[in-house]
Structures are given as structure tokens and as C-alpha cells.
Image (cartoon, grey):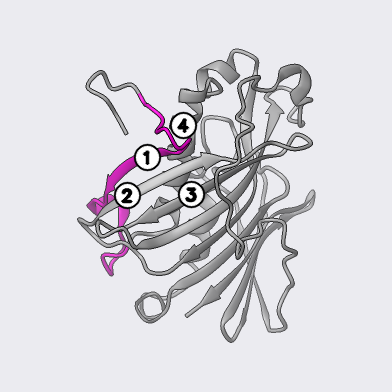
Amino acid sequence: MNNNNNEYVEAADGRYYEERRIITDDVDINYKWTLRSILAWMQELGSRHSHVLGYGFETLRAKNICWVCLRYHIKFASYPRLFDTVKTSSWPEPARLGIYPRMYSFADEAGDTKIYAASLWSLIDLEERGMINPASRGPSSYPARKIQTFDDLNPLSKIIIPDGEEMVYKYRPVYSDFDMNGHVNNTSYLKWFDDLFTLEEHAGHEVSDLLMQYNLEVRPDVELDLRLIRAEEKVYFAADSEAGNHFRMLAVIK
């Protein structure tokens, strides 16, 4: 939430809250909040809370480090739609071995949960592009308070590739795919995934469970193989290059 001075504040329960009104740029042709926009808001919400807790963008950039997402597990009960107001919240769980968990919960105005998620993050050196030792350069104020986790979410779950015909699409990331850290933005993969389906498929089906793993950043001038396997109610999607696997996900479709 915001106060009158536009400073971000944390609630007494250790969570960060903001209301989010869904606008036209957030939705698809079916007036439904898109996967890419949902993930972008999760990351913005986490960034704002991190600022409150003393490990926001400016603080970390002064140390030449930044946050990098490793895993997400997201469940969708239903999707907010155009002009809906969503009550969004996020909170960190205690860090362990240099891995920083962060949870999310999105509810409608009646308080019914629409979307909830668990994510895992690390810190990397912007020059060396490698994980840092959090004991020496990590955020000293990272919370040690346990708030809430979700029993049915496990970002560390192994992605099992389903049986089915594999389709491979060549793709070279473009200007709009990259973020300020110089690599493909976490949300770009979801745009690429969505663009592999027809308008009719988007109208008749939606993702109800999404497990994502970020394994290797994509820097400029890398050609990717986008791999898609459809198997009844599950869809596997990955981005590979000569360097190895960059990203993979498993979606449950209903």
C-alpha cells in the first residue's frame, strides 16, 4: 500500500499489500489478465517490498548486484479480467543457503483467492554474471520471520517432460525481450509461449498450474530453439541454445 508521500509501507503481518486495477494493456483479446502481465506485476510487487526492507534496486545496484529469479510455481483458480480490482500481497520467507523465497497471493474484492505463487531468488554479480556469497554482499536486513507457505506449491519440483510430438521454433530475441539487467526478461518467455497458440485455443483453454525454472540467462545475439510438447492436459515449453537449457516450464491446461 502507499501513503500520501508515495512511500511504500509494510503491514504489521509482514506482508506487503497493494490494490491493482486491471487496465487495457494488461489483458488479451478475451479481456483476461495475461500470464506475462501477471508475472510482471508479481515481480514489481516484490521489488517494492524489497525497497521497504532495505534491499531494493538502488541498494543492490550500488553493490553491483541484482536479483535473479530461479523458480516459480503458480496456481490459478481463475483469472482477473479487464477493470477488475485485485488485492495483491507478497512476502518473503527466511533465506537458506543463498536462496531467497518469496510468496504471492492475489484475491478479488470479496477476498477470494484467484492466484497464488511461490518463487525462489538468488543474487548475482552484474559483471561476473555469477551468484554471490550472501554472507559478504547480500542484504543484511533480509527477514527471518516465517509468515506463510503453500502446501501445494513447490518451486523445486522436477519438471517431467511429457510424451508427445515436439515442435521446435527458431527464435532470436529482439529489443523488447530484454530488461535493464541486459538479459531476456523473465516475462518474455511467457509471451513466447502464448504466441505459439491460436486465438481459438486461447479462448477455449487457460493455464491452471504453472511450474517454471530459469536455468541460464539469455544475453543478446543468442539464437534459441523454442521447444513445445503438447500432451493432453499438460504442455511443456523450453528455450535452449548451444549453451544449454535457458528456461523450461510445465503448464497444466484446463
- Give residue 66's quadrant in the image: top right
Q: Amino acid at mark 2?
A: Lys
Q: Image quadrant for the N terminus?
A: top left
Residue drawn 60% across the image and 65% down it: 152
As drawn, which residue projects farthest toward the bottom?
232
Q: Secondary structure at mark 4?
A: helix
> Between marks 3 and 4, how big is the CA–CA gap?
12 Å
Res 87 label: 2
Say if 87 sits above or below 112 in the image: above
Q: Amino acid at mark 1?
A: Tyr
Most prominent secondary structure in the magenta stretch?
loop
Which residue position holds label 3?
104
Q: Amino acid at mark 4?
A: His
> Between marks 4 and 2, how big is the CA–CA gap?
15 Å
Residues at marks 2 and 1 touching, judged by CB atoms closer than 8 Å: yes
The answer to which of 199 and 51 lies nearer the viewer is 51
Location of residue 251 in the rendering, given as x and y in whole percent from the top left corner: 57, 70
